[in-house]
Image (cartoon, rainbow, N blue to C red):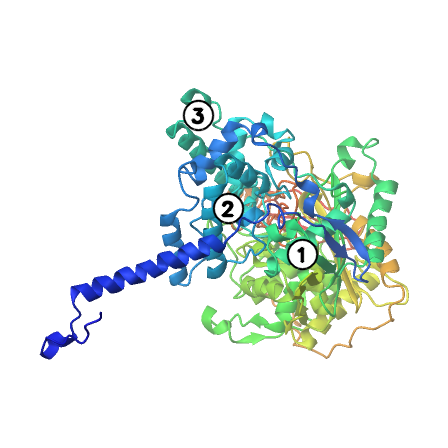
């Protein structure tokens, strides 16, 4: 039967197989394949629908392992018959996903070939899925892993389902089992989630939109999902959804499923409602769940879709008592001070944000995200866009102690290496309207040749005349902007930025470091990140990432456990000296409202330009807390929303970090530290050299310019978008924020030009563009926020 080697041939020809042998082997090989496929097909049965598609609740636990809330799972699925699904929805999906649906065998050989080729290259195992395959995967297969064996099983089950089940039943099952985002499984739940209508009432435009969302709600939901991916902003998602929707409508016309006249009615993205929260997720619970949910998804242990199907136990770091205490502290201020009916022009749209972090682990113990997660969707603890003002100054001081100031007699390259570490006793000018210099003594100028003068809050000179020199400890205590702006220039704004990142601030929350005002808080980190960064100082320079989930489990066991990792961002000498200076702020400076009797506290106040935001960030050895306050409309119907001034808010002449934010901080922390051991901060070792101990005759702080001098400076320079930001707007309030919260608008943005600080504890504000002045202070003084081409105000 097999003549090999060939008996009647000599030499090399004995080893060349005959055509009969080759063809016989090929026939036998393919016959075996067909036989194996036939056996596999015969052995495969059609799984019971919905056995694996029935969702369960997820249970979230407090830090003490008591149950916080059970949510998710089957609460948001309502199956409907095909007759209740508009033909436009059916054909939108068919046109976009699988135009041969009604004629194919349930699989796409070309798509499978592409998937096999990708797998052979080591790429993604997904791809090549028809509507039948997606239906089988969603509603019939328990195993959702993307392995070759599961893919093979999916193919055979799909062929059998395609052969034995009517196409209409498959399409109905797919549309009822698919995930559309916002916790909505099935077309009926999706219609309610996005448009608050029944599926039967969807119009072709809405159907085309929902077919786009099926590609992945993270990137097509107009509400955005920046907590999962910073690229999934509301604006970017709207553009993607609009493009995909229009493409679907065009294909529906091309394939004869929609008339051109009807298609012309739907050229704009349909209006969707805000994501609606479960009633159990009201108050702070919704913010906590979103924060934890985002953390779980980012960990990679569970996908968003898997989490939505339920069955998981999520153990969080949140301390119920501390969460309640923070909410009570904020609500107390609302109740006693904020009265929109009495002061509609001053007290409307007032918002607070807060976060409290364990300094030794990075665990987020409490947050305040807003008044109610079912009404205010943006998590104010996670993202606001509100600039931090003078609470940024400690990072400047840390940079001066870590790297030192540059030698003015050296060139820019050598000066990077030849530096002098700074002591808190170093002297800098606290003169108002101080002309800011580069490190080498030359006058700083922007690209238009315009100079920068730093204004102090109230236009007051701070320090001893005639040079008004003041040491850095006192400059921090009184929040003197001119001193820290010049210090930042001497250190280098690149090092100031690096210092902030080392402490734990995210790069995309920092403004461009191209203007002197960078040193006084034109950036907009979240309350979570600010509390975490100050925790780095509290624990002698050890930096840890803030986290909200300790572990995730399901019926199969533990899927994820958080591991605390730390790095030494600063030496203990640097961090402890920063803490020692910040203690002065609380003991006898702008942060005196935050004192906790019997405990050591370090912290810093901050206020921004136009009195549009105010902060207090402070810490004890065990707990670091940040509180922010600002005015920003919730109403999305208001075009060009922006931060509003707070002059007169709460009956106060001016809101600053030393007022409501520090009051809330003190009220919350007084309760939060009860039961904690009374600890002292480490005694700092002496550090650095005293800079400018003998006032130099040059450069002499310039007096306020005359009118003619002012006129010689051209109008406010036009800053580049990367360096400035005029009243940054937070993203549309949706299920949440930035980094920590999924499905929430996250505002990562640049910053405005910012200014200085005045004496007597008065905190000022940031100027809206890096052209002007910067004034800041903290306390009772009312800061003048006048702006012209060479002045700026910030605090």
The residue labelled by disc 3 is 258
Q: Secondary structure at mark 3?
A: loop
Which circle's residue, 1 or 2, is located before the other in the chain?
2
Residue 134 is labelled as 2
Q: Residue at x 62, y 69 (%)?
A: 400
Residue 196's spot in the image, x, y percent?
Answer: 65, 31
Between marks 1 and 2 in the image, the one whose residue lies nearer the viewer:
2
Q: Nearer the viewer, residue 282 or 506?
A: 282
Q: Residue at x 41, y 43 (%)?
A: 105
Which residue is most to the top?
261
Residue 715 visible in image: no
Which circle's residue, 1 or 3, is located before the other in the chain?
3
When asked about the image quadrant of residue 684, the answer is bottom right
The residue labelled by disc 1 is 481
User: Dot 1, how many residues are within 10 Å of its Cα: few (below 14), some (14-19), or many (20+)?
Assistant: many
- Image position of 10 (left or right of 446): left
- Image position of 404 (left or right of 372): left
Relative to 495, residue 709 above or below: above
């Amino acid at each position: 039967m097999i003549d090999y080697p060939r008996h009647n041939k000599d030499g090399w020809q004995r080893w060349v197989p005959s055509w009969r042998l080759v063809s016989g082997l090929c026939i036998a090989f393919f016959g075996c394949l067909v036989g194996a496929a036939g056996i596999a097909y015969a052995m495969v049965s059609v799984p019971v629908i919905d056995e694996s598609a029935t969702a369960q609740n997820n249970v979230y636990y407090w830090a003490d392992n008591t149950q916080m809330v059970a949510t998710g799972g089957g609460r948001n699925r309502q199956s409907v018959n095909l007759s209740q699904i508009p033909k436009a929805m059916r054909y939108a999906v068919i046109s976009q996903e699988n135009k041969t649906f009604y004629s194919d065998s349930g699989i796409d050989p070309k798509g499978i070939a592409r998937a096999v080729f990708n797998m052979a290259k080591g790429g993604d195992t997904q791809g090549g899925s028809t509507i039948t395959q997606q239906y089988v995967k969603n509603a019939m297969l328990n195993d959702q892993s993307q392995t070759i064996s599961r893919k093979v099983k999916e193919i055979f089950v799909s062929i059998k389902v395609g052969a034995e089940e009517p196409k209409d039943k498959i399409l109905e099952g797919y549309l009822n089992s698919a995930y559309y985002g916002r916790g909505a499984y099935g077309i009926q739940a999706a219609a309610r989630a996005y448009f608050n209508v029944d599926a039967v009432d969807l119009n072709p435009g809405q159907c085309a939109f929902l077919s786009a969302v099926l590609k992945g709600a993270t990137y097509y939901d107009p509400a955005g999902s920046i907590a999962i991916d910073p690229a999934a902003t509301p604006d970017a998602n709207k553009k993607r959804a609009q493009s995909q929707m229009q493409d679907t409508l065009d294909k529906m016309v091309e394939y004869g499923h929609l008339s051109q006249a009807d298609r012309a009615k739907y050229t704009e993205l349909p209006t969707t409602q805000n994501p609606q929260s479960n009633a159990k997720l009201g108050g702070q619970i919704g913010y906590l769940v979103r924060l934890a949910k985002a953390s779980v998804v980012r960990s990679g242990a569970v996908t968003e879709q898997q989490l939505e199907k339920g069955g998981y136990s999520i153990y969080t770091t949140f301390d119920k008592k501390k969460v309640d205490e923070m909410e009570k502290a904020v609500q107390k201020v609302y109740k006693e001070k904020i009265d929109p009916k009495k002061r509609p022009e001053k007290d409307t749209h007032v918002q607070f944000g807060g976060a409290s972090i364990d300094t030794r682990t990075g665990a987020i113990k409490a947050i305040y995200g807003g008044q109610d997660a079912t009404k205010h969707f943006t998590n104010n603890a996670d993202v606001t866009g509100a600039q931090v003002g003078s609470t940024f100054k400690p990072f400047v001081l840390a940079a001066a102690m870590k790297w030192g100031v540059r030698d003015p007699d050296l060139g820019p390259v050598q000066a990077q290496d030849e530096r002098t570490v700074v002591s808190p006793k170093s002297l800098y000018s606290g003169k108002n309207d101080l002309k800011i210099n580069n490190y080498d003594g030359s006058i700083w100028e922007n690209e238009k040749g315009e100079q920068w003068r730093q204004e102090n809050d109230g236009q007051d000179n701070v320090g001893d005349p005639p040079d008004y020199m003041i040491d850095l400890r006192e400059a921090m205590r009184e929040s003197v902007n001119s001193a820290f702006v010049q210090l930042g220039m001497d250190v280098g704004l690149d090092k100031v930025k690096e210092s902030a990142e080392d402490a734990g601030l995210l790069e995309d929350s920092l403004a461009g470091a191209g203007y002197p005002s960078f040193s006084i808080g034109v950036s907009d980190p979240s309350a979570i990140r600010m509390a975490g960064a100050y925790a780095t100082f509290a624990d002698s320079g050890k930096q840890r990432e803030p986290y909200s989930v300790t572990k995730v489990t399901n019926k199969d066991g533990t899927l994820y456990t958080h591991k605390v990792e730390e790095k030494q961002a600063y030496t203990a000498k640097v961090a402890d000296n920063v803490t020692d200076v910040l203690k002065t702020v609380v003991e006898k400076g702008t942060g005196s409202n935050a004192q906790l009797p019997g405990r050591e506290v370090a912290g810093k106040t901050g206020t921004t330009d136009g009195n549009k935001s105010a902060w207090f960030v402070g810490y004890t050895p065990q707990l670091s807390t940040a509180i922010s306050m600002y005015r920003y409309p919730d109403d999305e119907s208001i075009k060009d929303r922006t931060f509003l001034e707070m002059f007169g808010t709460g009956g106060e002449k001016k809101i600053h970090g030393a007022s409501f934010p520090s009051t809330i901080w003190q009220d919350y922390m007084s309760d939060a530290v009860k039961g904690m051991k009374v600890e002292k901060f480490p005694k700092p070792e002496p550090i650095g050299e005293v800079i400018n101990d003998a006032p130099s005759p040059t450069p002499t702080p310039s007096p306020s310019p005359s009118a003619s001098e002012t006129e010689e400076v051209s109008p406010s320079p036009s800053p580049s978008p990367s360096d400035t930001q005029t009243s940054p707007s937070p993203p549309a309030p949706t299920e949440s924020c930035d980094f920590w919260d999924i499905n929430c608008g996250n505002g990562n943005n640049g910053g405005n030009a910012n200014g200085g600080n005045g004496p007597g504890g008065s905190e000022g504000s940031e100027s809206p563009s890096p052209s002007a002045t910067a004034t800041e202070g903290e306390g009772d003084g009312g800061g003048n926020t006048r702006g012209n081409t060479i002045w700026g105000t910030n605090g």
